[in-house]
């Protein structure tokens, strides 16, 4: 009996089906079906960048998030540079406002918990503060950091 086995045609589909069942192409599924996450933010309409709101967000981020997150490097949590290109605005805000439930029910957040082995804690952030943090991320991802602007603001307030 002669076996006629062609690797690509016969084996590749089986390999793909097997990998789907154990969750290997997680990143692909994430990109094809952007999640809004689990939490109070169901829909969010973004307007043009608001520099003032971004400045507030930088302050809140530094105070409440900066001990575990950096923008350009992995720390206790993931680097957040580019997060606005990887996640929906709703997902970002829900992760800030509802981290425990997100890591229990949202597949992307579960994956981050597995990777970083640290549960993101709720930092008593209001919805308004979460929105300002999101605006800071948007500003950073499109224009870079706003350090110089904050320095100028502090100098003006000292006068």
Image: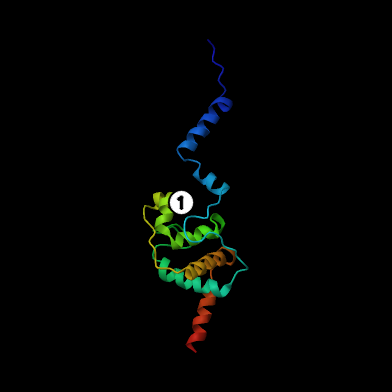
Who's the residue at 51% across and 77% down the image?
150
> 97 or 110, which is in the foreground?
97
**Location of residue 51 with respect to 80 vertically, above or below:** below
User: Which of the 4 quarters of the picture holds residue 123?
Assistant: bottom left
Residue 72 visible within the image:
no
User: Which of the 4 quarters of the picture holds residue 149?
Assistant: bottom right
SS at mark 1 in the image: loop
Residue 29 pos. (x, y %): 53, 45
**Location of residue 149 with respect to 85 vertically, above or below:** below
- Horizontal side of residue 152 vs 48, given as left or right: left
The residue lying furthest to the bottom in this view is 159
Residue 80 pos. (x, y %): 49, 60
Q: How is the rendered protein coloured?
A: rainbow
Residue 73 pos. (x, y %): 46, 59
Within 10 Å of disc 1 (Cα), the crowding (few <14, some 14-19, many 20+) is some
Number of on-image labels: 1
Residue on which disc 1 sits: 106
The residue lying furthest to the right in this view is 48
Who's the residue at 53% across and 48% down the image?
30
Residue 38 visible within the image:
yes
> 12 or 22, which is in the foreground?
22
Residue 26 pos. (x, y %): 49, 44
Who's the residue at 45% across and 38% down the image?
22
């Amino acid at each position: 009996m002669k076996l006629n086995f062609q690797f690509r045609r016969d084996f590749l589909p089986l390999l793909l089906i097997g990998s789907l069942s154990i969750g290997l192409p997680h990143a692909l599924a994430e990109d094809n079906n952007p999640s809004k996450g689990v939490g109070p933010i169901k829909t969010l309409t973004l307007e043009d960048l608001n520099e003032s709101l971004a400045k507030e967000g930088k302050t809140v981020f530094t105070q409440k998030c900066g001990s575990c997150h950096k923008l350009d490097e992995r720390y206790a949590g993931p680097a957040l540079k580019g997060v606005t290109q990887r996640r929906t605005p709703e997902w970002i805000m829900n992760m800030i406002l509802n981290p425990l439930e997100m890591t229990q029910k949202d597949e992307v957040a579960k994956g981050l918990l597995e990777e970083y082995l640290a549960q993101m804690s709720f930092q008593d952030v209001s919805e308004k503060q979460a929105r300002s943090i999101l605006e800071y991320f948007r500003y950073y991802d499109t224009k870079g950091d706003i350090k110089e602007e904050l320095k100028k603001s502090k100098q003006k307030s000292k006068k």
